[in-house]
């Protein structure tokens, strides 16, 4: 503006009447910036609203609104009968000092040093296989296009129409919800686990369930036996809890408890029905060995049943929990792979006394799963829609895996060892050439929007004895699989 009124400079105040931001906010921003930068010194008298409005060409309402906001935030103060003055405040910190703005590299280094050991354990990886629905051959994502939208919408309307507004509040967590009751019934038929609703605890997904258990049961320094290779995201939960993690090596029968020499083990984490990432199912003999091993040490086992619903040949394989007679196993399940990942609905099945404690923890730390969501998922199971949805998904995913295997065995015969038919969402494909740079391959796959993963990601030291890719099929239809495998071949062939 280039004007001065009674010693008050309007230089630097730029108001745009055609801008999207309201004029009073533009004036507020300009004056606030001038005060913080020291362009307007503390103690300076502000011209009257009438004078400012005339000089700036805006309404008095605009000026008064901006000044009132500045006064409310402590930038201005009024002296009775004298006028409005700029408050004397410390100047804003300059870049590179204190918490002021710093160059990105310097700021990154500074805040990296501030991370706790827990923060470092939880954020070590910079490149993730994102489940954003756009990636083909994604190894850990269902096809959300198969979600029963019409049924879900109808159930949503029904719950709303009933007008029970208690469901919008936190529920009485010590009474089983409809969803917990339905899970107890469904799990008895589908997985052979006999339990009461009071032994079911709903959570905000499988990872949340394990986080709850870590908070409830583990002290820093406690020993946890963990599958090697195993789910890196879950391993990081125990690492962040400052636990001593010992490897339970995976062989052709799954995690082998005899590879764990330590006796003082408080928890063990296993994936029995479909080991992640090796895809092997734990046979009966190994399950019984695992249960005896845990009982001998008074060790609790966390069994994550991830992806067990999707077995395409033969009947479902019962989980470890179905054989548990002594309350050694805490079973973790979720609906992320069968419904929508964004719903964040999971559950645990555990001895009632432990479930009681877990509910108390949820009440203090997380409250509870939203009742509204619980009602809808509970009715989806109760009315039989969930079971029918699972059957449909299995048929579709089986066809997709068959097509992927056909392509891998023909077009990739010189690249991969012949992959086996697998349960879950992906096939484990070992490279014939073990000198290949799998990191470079993965980077190229990310650039082509392919959601494959490298086997080494699942090892504690990020190094696998054999190089391999996890190539998904569930989230992509057959046409998409054909297109994506051409891109995958190009990513591998590039020298």
Image (cartoon, helix red, strand yellow):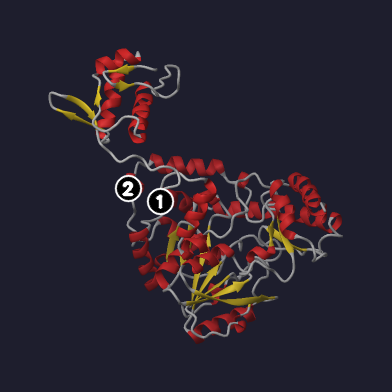
Q: Circle 1 is placed at which residue position?
A: 370
Can you say whether 430 is above or below 395 in the image?
A: below
Q: Circle 2 is placed at which residue position?
A: 166
Q: Position of residue 83 (x, y in %)?
A: 18, 24
CA gap, disc 1 and disc 2: 11 Å
Relative horizontal placement of residue 495, taking residue 290 as reference (left or right): right
Q: Is residue 147 visible in this depiction of the protein?
A: yes
Can you say whether 60 is above or below 131 in the image?
A: above
Viewer-proximal residue among 128 and 64: 64
Q: Is residue 345 visible in this depiction of the protein?
A: no
Relative horizontal placement of residue 19, taking residue 419 as reference (left or right): left
Q: Position of residue 396 (x, y in %)?
A: 69, 51
Q: Position of residue 410 (x, y in %)?
A: 86, 56
Viewer-proximal residue among 426 and 66: 66
For the point 28% across and 18% down, which residue is it?
Answer: 61
Mark 1: which secondary structure? Answer: loop
Mark 2: which secondary structure? Answer: helix
Answer few, some or many: residues within 10 Å of disc 2's Cα (few below 14, many 20 plus, some between 14 and 19). few
Q: Position of residue 385 (x, y in %)?
A: 55, 50
């Amino acid at each position: 503006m280039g004007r001065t009124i009674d010693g008050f400079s309007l230089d630097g105040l730029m108001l745009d009447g055609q801008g999207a931001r309201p004029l009073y906010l533009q004036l507020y921003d300009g004056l606030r910036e001038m005060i913080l930068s020291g362009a307007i010194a503390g103690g300076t008298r502000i011209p009257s609203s009438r004078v400012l409005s005339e000089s700036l060409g805006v309404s008095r309402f605009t000026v008064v609104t901006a000044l009132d906001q500045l006064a409310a935030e402590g930038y201005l103060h009024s002296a009775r009968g004298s006028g409005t003055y700029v408050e004397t405040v410390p100047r804003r910190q300059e870049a590179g000092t204190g918490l002021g703005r710093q160059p990105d590299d310097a700021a990154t280094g500074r805040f990296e040093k501030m991370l706790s050991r827990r923060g470092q354990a939880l954020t070590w990886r910079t490149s993730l296989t994102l489940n954003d629905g756009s990636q083909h051959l994604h190894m850990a994502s269902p096809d959300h296009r198969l979600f029963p939208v019409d049924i879900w919408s109808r159930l949503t309307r029904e719950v709303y129409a009933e007008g029970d507004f208690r469901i919008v509040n936190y529920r009485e967590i010590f009474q089983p919800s409809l969803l917990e009751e339905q899970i107890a019934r469904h799990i008895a038929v589908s997985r052979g686990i006999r339990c009461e609703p009071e032994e079911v605890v709903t959570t905000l997904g499988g990872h949340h369930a394990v986080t709850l258990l870590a908070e409830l049961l583990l002290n820093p320094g406690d020993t946890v036996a963990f599958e090697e290779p195993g789910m890196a995201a879950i391993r990081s939960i125990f690492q962040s809890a400052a636990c001593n993690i010992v490897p339970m090596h995976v062989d052709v029968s799954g995690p082998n408890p005899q590879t764990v020499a330590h006796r003082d083990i408080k928890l063990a984490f296993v994936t029995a029905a479909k080991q992640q990432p090796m895809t092997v199912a734990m046979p009966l003999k190994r399950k019984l060995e695992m249960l005896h091993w845990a009982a001998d040490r008074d060790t609790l086992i966390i069994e994550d049943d991830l992806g067990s619903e999707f077995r395409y040949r033969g009947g479902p394989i019962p989980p470890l929990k179905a054989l548990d007679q002594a309350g050694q196993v805490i079973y973790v399940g979720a609906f992320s792979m069968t419904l929508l990942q964004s719903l964040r609905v999971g559950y645990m099945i555990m001895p009632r006394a432990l479930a009681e404690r877990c509910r108390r923890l949820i009440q203090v730390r997380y409250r509870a799963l939203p009742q509204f969501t619980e009602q809808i998922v509970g009715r989806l199971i109760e009315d039989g829609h969930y079971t029918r949805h699972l059957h449909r998904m299995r048929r579709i995913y089986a066809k997709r895996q068959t097509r992927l295997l056909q392509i891998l065995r023909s077009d990739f015969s010189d690249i991969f060892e012949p992959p086996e038919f697998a349960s879950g969402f992906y096939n484990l494909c070992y490279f014939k050439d073990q000198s290949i740079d799998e990191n470079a391959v993965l980077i190229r796959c990310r650039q082509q929007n392919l959601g494959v993963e490298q086997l080494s990601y699942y090892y504690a030291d990020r190094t696998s004895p054999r190089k391999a890719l996890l190539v998904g099929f569930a989230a992509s239809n057959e046409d998409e699989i054909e297109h994506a495998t051409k891109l995958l071949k190009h990513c591998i062939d590039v020298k």
